[in-house]
Amino acid sequence: MLRTTSPRSTPPGETRAHRPTSFWLRLLKQRRERMYDEALDLSTPIEWSSPEEQEAAIAFFNAAFRAEESGLRQAHEIAGEIESWDPELAETLRLYGDEEGWHRELLTKFLAYIGGDVRPMGPTTRTFYRLYGRAKRHETIVLTNLMFETIGSTTYRLALRTAKPHPAVRQMLTVLTRDESFHVPLNVHFLRRVLEHAREAEGDDRAQRRLVPLYHLLTASLVASAAASRRRAKLFDNIPFKTLARAYAEQLGRLFVNADDLGFVPARPMLAALGLGKDDIYGHDDVISEDAAETAADRSKVIVEAL
Ligand SMILES: [Fe+2]
Ligand SMILES: [Fe+2]
């Protein structure tokens, strides 16, 4: 988690000024300068307690690999289409996609190091990514990606505390946690820009309204996906289902109450089912803080904290 200093919620009726694309582009260019210098220290082999624990670790990092791959592909694809109306946003998307590509490279090495490889996806994951891969509207793609980023960074943060304590595992999780925390506010910016463009093109808010059912469906699916991932990865990350499902709902809830201009309000019954109340969602660290993102541009200054 990026430490932030300004928890807030926008007072009703007030609109916050947000940073322009040039701000994000500058940060990404700054990050790119040193990105490829950072290497994983994979010199100490991991001693697994059992072959099942090792399998669970391979499953955990395969899921991460697929998320990176999807983020990279979608960002580069929509960048090509956005080029015509906002070349600066297109360049920002490409640089963001490159960061995911770099994560994919790191994960490929890491998987080999833990005695695994990139595996074919299971039927559920395959269906999920296939449906996502078919999405055409930019706002659908960006919202889905933003929610993936949020649950990714939540999982990594929790795993930092509970997964097998080994320096290489820690380093891999720290890199992912740190960068995905930056990607969350960045994707909020992408979503705002894409919706703004749709509003100009269509003359009203229908793109935003179309997203509301998708937002609820995705929230429920992602919370439920915690059950499937527990079957495959829990022996490695040691996160109980209830903890993970609750953390997903909590972090997604906080994300959108802090970006309340997007119009996504978490469903109360779902929060209640997970034991979450208003106080868990409102008035917490701003997970989309642009100031925190600015600090995160210099990776060496980020303080990564477990959840
Ligand atoms: Fe990533
Ligand atoms: Fe990311």
Image: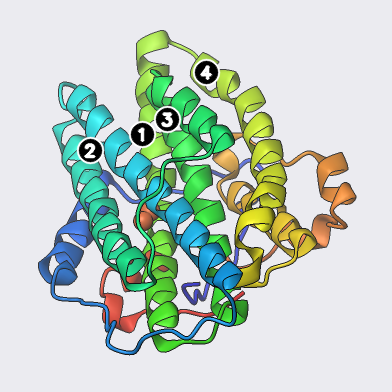
Indicate the quadrant containing the C terminus: top left, top right, bottom left or bottom right. bottom right
- Going from N to C along the chain, the mark reached first, 1 or 4, is 1
**In percent of the image, x 40 and y 66: which residue is there?**
176
Q: Position of residue 71 (x, y in %)?
A: 35, 43
Q: Is residue 287 visible?
A: no
Instruction: From the top left corner, tell me how far across and down residue 47 is, in percent.
Output: 48, 86
Q: Tell whether 180 sits left or right of 234.
A: left
- Whether tag 1 and tag 4 are in contact, CB under 8 A, the answer is no
Q: Amino acid at mark 3?
A: Ile
Spatial separation of the CA atoms under disc 2 and disc 3: 15 Å
Quick one: SS at disc 1? helix
Q: In the drawing, what numbered circle is on residue 52?
A: none
Badges 2 and 4: C-beta atoms under 8 Å apart?
no
Distance, label 3 to label 1, CA atoms, is 13 Å
How far, Cα to Cα, is label 4 from label 3?
17 Å
Going by the numbered disc 1, the residue's amino acid type is Arg
The residue that mark 4 highlights is: 205
Which mark lies nearer to you, 2 or 3?
Answer: 3
Q: Residues within 10 Å of mark 1 (few under 14, many from 20)?
A: some
Is the residue under label 2 in contact with that under label 1 (CB below 8 Å)?
yes
Q: Nearer the viewer, residue 280 or 57?
A: 57
The residue singled out by tag 1 in the image is 193
The answer to whether residue 21 is above or below residue 165 is: above
Q: Which residue is mark 3?
A: 141
- Specify the amino acid type for callout 2: Leu
Farthest top residue? 202
Residue occupying the far left of the picture? 33
Of the numbered discs 2 and 4, the one sitting upstream in the chain is: 2
Q: Is residue 274 left or right of residue 14?
A: right
Which residue is denoted by mark 2 in the rendering? 89
